[in-house]
Image: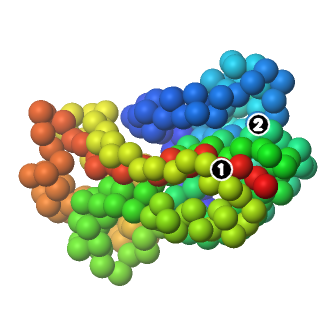
Amino acid sequence: MPDRWDSALYDDRHSFVWKKAADLIDLLHPQPGERILDLGCGTGHLTAQIAERGADVIGLDASASMIAQARQNYPKLKFVLADARTFELGTGFDAVFSNAALHWIPEPAPVIASVARALKPGGRFVLEMGAKGNIAQIVDALTTVLPTARNPWYFPTAAEYSQVLEQRGFEVRALWTIERWNKLEHPERGLREWLEMFAGTWFEGVPAKARGAIVAEIESRLRPSLFRDNAWWADYRRLRVIAIRE
């Protein structure tokens, strides 16, 4: 898969992705000595927070640039370049953790099968991802302006994701959605930078000289609802899950 991620832009302008999920680590409740996999670790900030609790943690991501940045950020931690659908890191993990990664993979079944294979019986899977309705206004604007583009995101309902987990040997202990509007970093270029970071797939095949006008049209459509208090906001809706491998 091509690596479309700009790890520097991610750390500089989109730190809310991991900062807003810091309390997810409390739900994971890592213990000293536990073996934990951070699936879709990005630039490694939450991986490091798990390690600070005393766990033996490995960060995994499919983006070479993200892994390179994570290794630079935290040289004492272990990071692995691999695909969440096919990774092989052995078995016996006490927990698998994932934040803001699994909605980038439209095939949930192989991901969950890989997680089940890595976990020991009774191991826990704690995750947050986009839920149905996540960034709904942004998706609507993109679909209107770029009707033939490929939507790269998988935002399931709670019932849908629960079913996939249960079919692959997990007991769902808790599952809920969170409405979370996120203020984007730059007061005027916030949405433009968000699109650059996260919506590149929508612009595949669009000539570079035409992109500016398309982005401007998207901004125009969304400004009445997503620009307030002199800042851009993104209408996030997240799904949180705690599941146990049977």
Q: Residue at image x 64%, y 34%? A: 28
**Residue 21 position (above or below residue 135):** above
Inspect this view and state whether residue 9 appears. no
**Image quadrant in which the N terminus is located:** bottom right
The answer to which of 86 and 160 lies nearer the viewer is 160
Query: Secondary structure beneath disc 2?
Result: strand
Q: Quadrant of residue 213?
A: bottom left
Query: Gap in Å between the C-alphas at discs 1 and 2?
Result: 15 Å
| x, y percent for residue 214 | 23, 64
16 sits to left or right of 60 = left
Quadrant in which the C terminus is drawn: bottom right
Q: Position of residue 63 (x, y in %)?
A: 64, 50
* Front residue (pair 210, 63): 63
Which one is nearer the viewer's eye here, 227 or 246? 246
Judged from the image, the secondary structure of the residue bearing numbered disc 1 is: strand
Query: Which residue appears at 62% of the width and 68% of the height?
Result: 164
Badge 2 is on which residue?
36
Which residue is at the far left? 224
Left or right: 72, with 213 as reference point: right
> Looking at the image, which is closer to me, 5 or 38?
38
Q: Which callout, 1 or 2, points to the residue nearer the camera?
A: 1
Residue under label 1: 243
Give the mark, 1 or 2, whose residue is nearer the N terminus: 2
Residue 118 is situated, as x and y percent measured from the top left of the image, at: 83, 51
Amino acid carrying label 1: it is Ala
Judged from this view, the residue extending furthest toward the bottom is: 148
Position of 151 relative to 131 (above/below): below
- Mark 2 belongs to which amino acid? Ile
Assess whether mark 2 and mark 1 are in contact (beta carbons under 8 angstroms): no
Marks counted in the figure total: 2
